[in-house]
Image: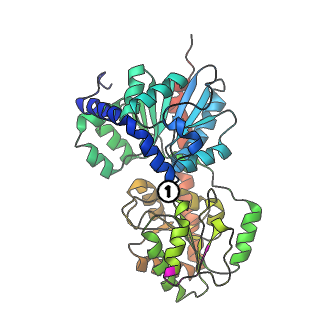
Amino acid sequence: MTAAEPPATLKVYRAAIGLCAPLAGLALRLRLSRGKEDEARLCERRGWASLPRPQGEVIWVHGASVGEMLSVLPLIEGIGARWPQTAILLTSGTVTSARLATERLPAGVLHQFVPLDVPAFLERFLDHWRPRLAIFAESELWPNTIMALKARGIRSALVNGRLSARSAARWRRLPATIAWLIGAFEICLAQGPGDGERLKSLGGHHVKVAGNLKLDVPAPGANAENLKALQASIGGRQVLIAASTHGGEETMLAEAHRQISARFPRLLTIIAPRHPERGAGIAEDLAGLGLRVKLRSKGQLPGKTTDIYIADTLGELGLIYRCGMVTFMGGSLIPHGGQNPIEPAKLSAAILHGPQVFNFAEIYQRLDAAGGAFAVASAAQLAQTATDLLDNPDAIARAAAQARLAVEEGGGALARTLDALAPLLAPERA
C-alpha cells in the first residue's frame, strides 16, 4: 500500500496552495464572470455545504464534468439498489453538470459543487459530510483532496479509470508523487487494458480492468415535440452533424461544408459546440465567412437556405444526433484528445473523427476496427469522407450498424464495477 507520509513534492504543493487560499475568491469571481460558476452556490466551492448531512453513512461519488457525471449515474443507481440505507453525495465541478444533476439524479441523491483543491476548503467539506468512502471517476487526481482523505483514514476508489499515454509520460517525471497519489486508492478500476497497465506501472494497487462505464449509459433521450419540429424544418436535406466541437474546428467545418455542398447543394451542417456559451461567437465567425447561420439558443430553426445550424443549448445532443446519420466528433482535429463517441454510436450514426483521440483511444480503435468510424486528418479529408458516405446511404447504414454493435458488445462495466466495489460499499457494522 502507499506510504503513510506523502512525499516532499506533495507537502510543498499543499503548503503552496494553502498560502494562495486568499486568492481563491478572486479566482472564483473571474470564473463567475466567464459563466463557469454558479453565483448562488459559490460557497460550495469553498467547502461550505448548502445542504444538511443525512443521518447514517454517506458515500461520496465525484464526476468532474458532464461526461464523468453521466457515466457514474448508473453506478449511483446500482449502489442505491444494493445498499438502500446508504446516502449518496454526488459532486461535480461545472455549471453544466450541476444543471443536468438537477434533472437526472435519482431521488434522494444529493448534489454539491466539489470544493477547490485547497486544504482549508477540503477540511470544511469533510467535517460536514464525513463520507465513509470516496469514489472518483476517470482521472481525478487532486493532490490535496487525496491527502485529506488519507489523513482521515477515509477509504477511496478510482472507477472508470482513464490515463492516456501522454499523461502517464508526464507523471513519470515525478514517480514518487504519482505512486503515492494512485497508491492511495484501495482499488483502481480501469476502462481498458492500456489504462490498467499505465495505472499499475505508476503505482496503482489492486488494478482491475472493469471496462468503460460510458458503454453502459443509456442513449440520450429527446423531447418528442422538439424533435418533430426540428426534423420538419430540415425536411429531406442531407445532414452532417458536428458534435462537441472546440475552438478552431468550426472554421474547418465551414470549409468542409463548402466542399461537400459542391456535391450536395442542400447540405445542412449542424454544429453542437462542446461549450454552448460559444454559440454566438461561432455564429459571428461563420457568418463572416459568408455562410447563413441560425442559433438554436435564440429559438430559431433551420430554414431552407440555412447552411449552418448551431445547436448551442444544454442537454439536447440526443435530439441533435437523431437528425442525421453521419456525425463528426469534435476535439479531434486539434490536440485536445477527442470527445466521447459512444452516444452517437448508440443512436446508429457513422462516426468521423480526427487523429487526436488519445482521451478515448481504445473506444475509437474499437469503432475503427469494426468499420463504424473513419479517421480524417483535415477539412479536405472530412469533406471527402462525408461526401462518399452521403452519396451511399447503404454504406452509412452499414457503418452505423457496426458502430452500434461495437459499443453494445463492449458493455458490462457497470456490473463488474459494482462487484469489485462491493467489499468497500458494504455498510460497516458497529
Q: Residue furthest top?
A: 430
Q: Residue at x 63, y 37 (%)?
A: 77
Q: By what rule are the colours in the image chosen?
A: rainbow
Badge 1, how many Cα within 10 Å: few under 14, some, many 20+?
many
Asked if residue 241 is positioned above or below residue 387 in the image, the reply reads above
Q: Residue 102 in the image: x percent, y percent?
A: 65, 44
| Residue 204 visible within the image | no
Q: Residue 3 or 271: which is nearer the viewer? A: 271
Q: Residue 145 in the image: x percent, y percent?
A: 41, 32
The verdict on residue 290 being magenta is: yes
| Residue 284 visible within the image | yes
Q: Residue at x 57, y 40 (%)?
A: 41
Asked if residue 227 is positioned above or below residue 14 in the image, the reply reads below
| Label 1 SS | loop
Asked if residue 195 is positioned above or below residue 379 in the image, the reply reads above
Q: Residue 301 in the image: x percent, y percent?
A: 68, 73
- Quarter of the image for the N terminus: give it: top left
Q: Residue furthest right?
A: 225
**Tag count in the figure?**
1
Q: Residue at x 24, y 43 (%)?
A: 172
Q: Residue at x 57, y 62 (%)?
A: 344
| Magenta-colored span | 288-294
Q: Residue 114 or 258: which is nearer the viewer? A: 114
Q: Residue 69 or 53: which is nearer the viewer? A: 53
Q: Is 391 left or right of 181, judged from the image as shown?
A: right
- Quarter of the image for the C terminus: give it: top right
Q: Residue 95 in the image: x percent, y percent?
A: 55, 48
The verdict on residue 248 being magenta is: no
Task: Identify residue type, mark 1.
Answer: Asn
Residue 198 figure quarter: top left
Q: Which residue is mark 1?
A: 340
